[in-house]
Image (cartoon, helix red, strand yellow):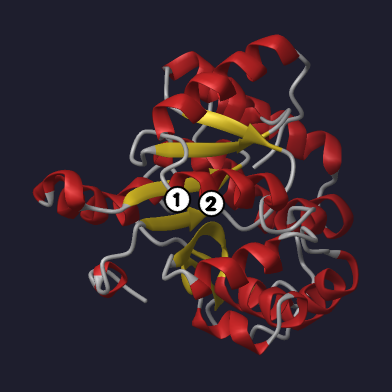
Amino acid sequence: MPFPDALKGNPKCIFFTDFDGTITLQDSNDYMTDNLGFGEARRKQLNADCLDGRATFRDIFTEMLASISTPLPACIDTLLAHITLDPHFTAFFHWATAHNVPVIVLSSGMRPIIRALLSKLVGDEASTIEIICNEAVPRPGKTLDQRDGWTIQFHDDSGFGHDKSLAIRPYREAVRKMGGDGPVLLFAGDGVSDLSAARETDLLFAKRGRDLVTYCEREGAPFTVFGDWSEILETTKKIYEGKTSVAEVAKEGAEEAKEMGTEKETTK
């Protein structure tokens, strides 16, 4: 449900989440680039350039997708055959639905791909999940089912292509006006396209061993780490029930990340 409808019913929490590599175990755009585009080595170099500030996410993502000539329907068929769901996401989604916790997907991916994957992996009930994302559109004089027939239409003009913070900010401003009675804003993500959302929520769940952990440590953003959605569900339940606070969770998360000190895989 779009803003401000998600605030109706006075939810205790609103949960924003990335899609690729967060709800799914693999990143669909990475998979297309690695297998249908210019390959893994070039993709990882571009992601490293973005994380280090040498390129914008918008620029590297445009280059990645431009390397894919496969028609969009064939891309979707390939992804449906190879992308899998975090096995605990459905349980989280059912709990959230039962407890009036809106789930909003903020993705740098493209709507036709996300909808197709959610429909297959979660089922028809996933149609209730709001998705704010980029679009796939035909190139001039082409159709989506032709080779080199499609391209990405970004959600906004930012360097991210889709600045996820812009979608969260109206909720943040509304919560501020509510004083202490507003919902807790939570976000789960894994990589560089989630950087803009890191400071807009009360707590960010950053996937263990990924780029987002590096960014949160560098910027001092409140975060905790997770391996799968069973951990997210456990922590969210405790916050929902008042058994812990976001400050306590963030402190524990920062300590865990510091102890890990492992090499991070470059992700989106």
Residue 109: image tag: none
Q: Secondary structure at mark 2?
A: helix
Q: Which one is in front, 40 or 265?
A: 265
Q: Secondary structure at mark 1?
A: loop
- Quadrant location, the N terminus: bottom left
Q: Which one is in front, 30 or 141?
A: 30
Q: Which one is in front, 188 or 99?
A: 99
Q: Quadrant of residue 31?
A: bottom right
Please provide percent x and percent y for residue 2: 32, 73
The kind of residue tagged 1 is Glu
Residue 237: image tag: 2
Is any atom of residue 67 visible in this view?
no
Q: Is residue 205 left or right of residue 179?
A: right
Please provide percent x and percent y for residue 259: 70, 10
Q: Is residue 159 left or right of residue 257?
A: left
Taking the spot 61% from the left edge, 85% from the top edge, the residue there is: 125
Please provide percent x and percent y for residue 267: 70, 38
- Quadrant location, the C terminus: top right
Please provide percent x and percent y for residue 95: 58, 67
The residue at which mark 1 appears reads as 241
Q: Do the CB atoms of the residues marked 2 and 1 lie less than 8 Å apart? A: yes
Q: Which one is in front, 186 or 130?
A: 186
Q: Is residue 187 above or below residue 47?
A: below
Marks 2 and 1, how far apart in space? 6 Å
